[in-house]
Image (cartoon, coloured by chain):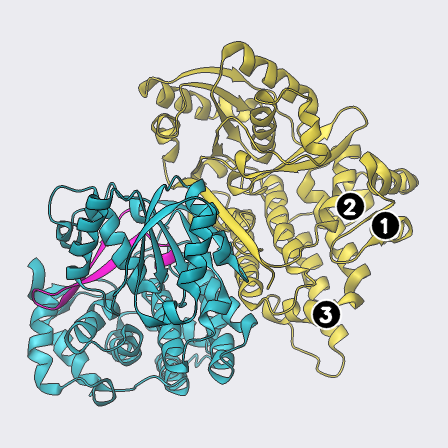
Chain colours: A cyan, B yellow
Amino acid sequence: MNNFHFYSPTWFEFGKDAESKAGELVKRFGGGKVLIHYGGGSAVRSGLLARVKASLEAAGVGYVELGGVKPNPRSGLVYEGIELCRREQVDFILAVGGGSAIDSAKAIAAGAVYEGDFWDFYSGKRIEKALPVGTVLTISAAGSEGSPDSVITNENGMFKRGASGDAIRPRFSILNPALTQTLPPYQTACGVTDIMAHLYERYLTNTPEVEVTDRLIEALLLTMIHEAPRVIADPNNYEARANIMWAGMMAHNNACGVGRSQDWNSHNIEHELSALYDCAHGAGLAVTMPAVFTYVINHDVMRFAQVAVRVWGCQMDFVHPERTARAGIEALRAFLISIGMPKNFAELGAKEEDIPKLVDVLCNGDGRPGSISGFMTLNEEDCANIYRLML
Amino acid sequence: MNNFHFYSPTWFEFGKDAESKAGELVKRFGGGKVLIHYGGGSAVRSGLLARVKASLEAAGVGYVELGGVKPNPRSGLVYEGIELCRREQVDFILAVGGGSAIDSAKAIAAGAVYEGDFWDFYSGKRIEKALPVGTVLTISAAGSEGSPDSVITNENGMFKRGASGDAIRPRFSILNPALTQTLPPYQTACGVTDIMAHLYERYLTNTPEVEVTDRLIEALLLTMIHEAPRVIADPNNYEARANIMWAGMMAHNNACGVGRSQDWNSHNIEHELSALYDCAHGAGLAVTMPAVFTYVINHDVMRFAQVAVRVWGCQMDFVHPERTARAGIEALRAFLISIGMPKNFAELGAKEEDIPKLVDVLCNGDGRPGSISGFMTLNEEDCANIYRLML
């Protein structure tokens, strides 16, 4: 196991009606004037935004609002939020929504107290300081509610990049599984896929002897396999929603990823798809993951065999371990299709003729060295081959 | 799943030589004058204490010392520590050792800023305020390095009681697996048993539909089963030590226990044994757990069958699930014996004739209502029967 530090100081308020504590929590963590940052209609229509505002008012906390966050959140709105925070002397950002609203809120939080361009943080500069952030989560997916990470799409070129820093870990996150019950099955499945991708990206490691984190990752994958079909069949299944919600946070606060190298090539390869076609990140991952895993399987056959046996219940083929390894990837593919995810470029709305452009931005964009690295280093040819596996 | 909040703001510094960061971490978390609190010879002999002091000195942090913490830490030393902190105007407590040193440090931290008797907290009063605590862990066992809990033995009657509160969660914990390599196999096995008990106490729940925490607990149990025999065979196996160390923390910071009722009757029943005979807590648990589980098995046969199948690899007997349930308990018993743990009262140094006394203190001591509660409520007769199962 590698040396590491782990720090996850977020207060999680979990359960029915947890959003009624928003005001109390903002005050506990030092907020006096809040920017409520959210997406669009659903938080308004469902009455959630009104309940959050009522809670802030009851606690005597002032607020301004900025809605309009889109899936795959954009840099333009971040600049707007930063400007608003400075003008209104906001001292706390409260995201109401999913990963997009939270990631956008984190970018605003870091940018508001930084003199330069906030995009510096998405070009490799570590975030050391930010306004405190709180969240009211409405979709189990990104894990941003417990992570130090944020992903933003730069509108000047339409490419996605991530930033990171303990300063943008939420001070508190309100997790009410009932808030996710209104999500349609397709979006629910996209969230499930994203969570499973966070687990696979950590599972694909080159660090030996990491039994404890292997087992924790497998535990969370098994939870998703058990619970996802139940919420697809019945969106109002609170218990299944609750199990997925805690799994989604645990998948990405990194308690199961410490002390080991991680992959993140599937995310990198997918990010170009959702940036270019504006497809759902989870849908892109459903197409990307089986292709990437098939391409890199020989890098560590026994690792793929292990997840096949322990998670997917495959029988170990002791003579031909690669058959087991491959059966695990096929089981993942079949599972993702069974919950309604797309299986190829066509279903995603992606186009074969764009592959050279996708590969170029992926491997050379924003100062990258002609390749991406993780479980394996993948050059332009590798990435083109992987995109072709998705046709 | 029940509503809950989860808050684990401890900074974990994990890996080789991590103790060299003690000074820097104390400063980061606001310490100016430290009480170093430790047990006895081994921390001195190994040179660990000297390295910790050198790190504090290099960071310009002052300190006083209080050694002499015994296993099953006593109230007397806590009073002494509180007095010392007040006299020396200590503002940070640094525990160097295992659960005993850490629990004693937590008691001192709470008592130093409290006007009444610190024992109030061990009689049910919640700890709301305490001096900040840091730890340098030397044994994987109690999980106190990441928990809000502390257990102290009252010398006035020799009974053990616990106290709890977010204020005594360590601000940082230094986890260097190499520091545990000097532990003899018996103490290592006691630690392993304690960790497994923390997992079983959470597993035995009356809350339905808790797949995610069930799976996380199973993951950590599987890790212990995989790694414990390796460290017993080779105490210098750093990798196995590392996996156990992270599992031990995760077993008890409650990430795997949220939103569900828990048991803790095995701990309660054991506490009277280690308080009366001063045996190792882990050794007491090795004898206690199989007896308790055998006694309560019919309360939820399928839960015991689940852990038997998923953790112990038992074949499910679909006609007679209780056979599978029982096979899982026997597998646990055999495993604990295989790592060198005692199996009955005699090997523990406990005496049959003390059972009435043990039961009386257990069920009636310190204001208890003639029973203990958890997975099942156990009255005096139940507890006597359980102790007799250990003969």
- Of the pair A322 and B250, the residue shown nearer to us: B250
Of marks 2 and 3, which one's residue comes earlier in the chain?
A: 2
Q: Within the image, what quadrant is residue B327 found in? A: bottom right
Would you place residue A283 above or below residue B176 in this image?
Answer: below
Q: Secondary structure at mark 1?
A: helix
User: Left or right of B171: which side holds B21?
Assistant: left
Query: Residue sitting at 33 percent across and 28 percent down?
Result: B24
Point out residue A286 in the picture as x, y percentages from the top left corner. 31, 79
Q: Chain of mark 1?
A: B
Q: Position of residue A380 (x, y in %)?
A: 9, 72
Residue B355 position (above or below residue B201): above
**Which of the 4 image quarters holds residue A334?**
bottom left
How far separated are the C-alphas under marks 3 and 1? 21 Å
* Chain holding disc 3: B
Q: Confirm whether the magenta stretch covers residue A147.
A: yes
Q: Residues within 10 Å of mark 1 (few under 14, many from 20)?
A: many
| Residue type indicated by callout 2 | Ile
Look at label 3 and name its amino acid: Ala
Q: Report which residue position mark 3 lands on.
A: B325
Which of pointers 2 and 1 lies earlier in the amino acid sequence? 2
Which mark is in front, 3 or 1?
A: 1
Residues at discs 2 and 1 in contact (Cβ within 8 Å): yes
Name the chain letter of the residue that bears numbered label 2. Answer: B
Q: Which residue is mark 1?
A: B383
Q: Mark on residue B269?
A: 2
Q: Are marks 2 and 3 in contact (CB under 8 Å)?
A: no
